[in-house]
Image: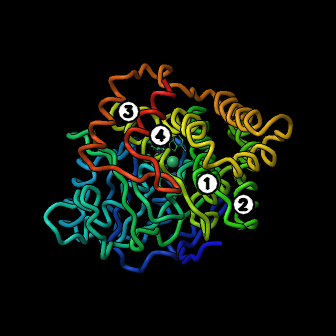
Amino acid sequence: MNNFTFYNPVKILFGKGQISAISNEIPQGARIMVTYGGGSIKKNGVYDQVMEALKDFEVLEFSGIEPNPHYETLMQAVDIAKRQQIDFFLAVGGGSVIDGTKFIVAAMEYKGADPWDILAKREPVTNATPFGAILTLPATGSEMNSGSVVTRVSTQEKLAFGSPFTFPKFSVLDPETTFTLPVRQISNGVVDAFTHVLEQYLTYPVNAPLQDRMAEAVLLTLKEEGPKAVHNPQDYDTMANFMWSATMALNGVIRTGVPTDWATHYIAHELTALHGIDHARTLAVVLPSLLRYKSGNKKAKLLQYGSRVWGVNAGTEDERIEATIQATIAFFESLDIKTKLSDYEVGEDTIKKIVARFEERGVKDLGERADIQIPDVKQILTMSL
Ligand code: NZQ
Ligand code: ZN
């Protein structure tokens, strides 16, 4: 097992009715900005529950944070929050609202010229305004990690940052808030969480059987509960299991002491940046080709994953690896998530664009062995056509 440091200070309030408990988690007298998206929280009663819980606080609202949150919008929130002397934020929504709020709280305290540099130049975050989260979409794990992905519309860039200062102080996970999710977002959530686990598991063995089995537990649970969630999104127990699985997929626990890949995410973000394709769908396109392209490096873990998660035990090693990748594709497709670039009307011109911007950005050494270079990215994307 590799050395590791594990730090996760996020307090989780899980279950029915937990929104009412947030007033105990926010400092008395705080001036709060509630951030949210396009209004789903007003249709499902979450907004009313939040406002009721915050009735003894000074509250300002900032709505309109888009899916794949826009830097341009988030900077408007920073501007208002500074003028209004906001000292606590509450993000209410999916990964985009939570990620967007992480950028806002970091930008609030940023001393440099332009907070975009936190993303573009990897300028360190040295402080942030505190915030909490109320999750309404199980998918990203943002509710229990410190990462954030922000899109700049003017340049069509989608970049990530993280810092020890951008963990939520608390997150409420009430499965009832998910009952209004459209099927498309549930499928997205299952595939995103599943891919998060694979990026931390399908690398190479370092004799970490506990981490392997914890990763497999999350995969097996998503495999069982994901289709149930799609078919019955108002079943409390199903959504509870899905919700906790998605959080466990990316809260840092399963990646302790093991190598991680993240090349699929890095490449896939470009497809959202350039074409606005849902995050999970871009992963479903890139992942199968990446696994095929890197099957030599990932052989031992692919065979283990195939056997333990999909029951693939027959045939030569090559046949088992291909059957395992096919099983993964079939799982995604069964959730109505397409796995080819052509399904999204994306062609070779986009691959050229991605290669050109990676060259400009000096991208190199992706993947768990830091051996995926730009020509490899081109190959992987070409295999996804
Ligand atoms: O904006 P509203 O009206 O709230 O509607 C949202 C949005 O249109 C809707 N929605 C959310 N909860 C709902 C609901 N509709 C009905 N009922 C509910 N309960 O769903 C739509 C999508 O929401 P969004 O937040 O964009 O989805 P998701 O949670 O999948 O987040 C995706 C973003 O997270 C980033 C992605 O790149 C993308 O920008 N990621 C963040 C990560 C992290 N912080 O660790 C890791 C991930 O790999 C990912 O990159
Ligand atoms: Zn993801």
Mark 3 is surrounded, within 10 Å at the Cα level, by few (under 14), some (14 to 19) or many (20 or more) other residues, namely: some
Q: Are marks 1 and 4 in contact (CB under 8 Å)?
A: no
Which residue is located at x 28 percent, y 53 percent?
A: 74
Amino acid under disc 2: Asp
Badge 2 or badge 3: first in the primary sequence = 2
Considering only vertical position in the picture, is 344 above or below 56? above
Residue 306 or residue 95, whichever sits in front: 306
The answer to whether the residue bearing label 4 lies less than 8 angstroms from the nearest atom of ligand 1 is yes
Mark 2 is surrounded, within 10 Å at the Cα level, by few (under 14), some (14 to 19) or many (20 or more) other residues, namely: many
Residue 319 coordinates in the image, percent (x, y): 76, 33
Badge 1 or badge 3: first in the primary sequence = 1
Residue 1 coordinates in the image, percent (x, y): 66, 72
* Mark 3 element type: loop
Distance of label 3 from label 4 (alpha carbons): 8 Å
Mark 4 is surrounded, within 10 Å at the Cα level, by few (under 14), some (14 to 19) or many (20 or more) other residues, namely: many
Distance of label 4 from label 2 (alpha carbons): 25 Å
Distance of label 1 from label 4 (alpha carbons): 22 Å
* Mark 2 element type: helix
Which residue is located at x 65 percent, y 27 percent?
A: 333
Badge 1 or badge 2: first in the primary sequence = 1
Numbered mark located on residue 279 in the image:
4
Q: Which residue is mark 1?
A: 203
Residue 379 coordinates in the image, percent (x, y): 45, 33
Badge 1 or badge 4: first in the primary sequence = 1
Badge 4 or badge 2: first in the primary sequence = 2
Can you tell which of label 4 and label 2 is closer to the viewer?
2
Numbered mark located on residue 172 in the image:
none
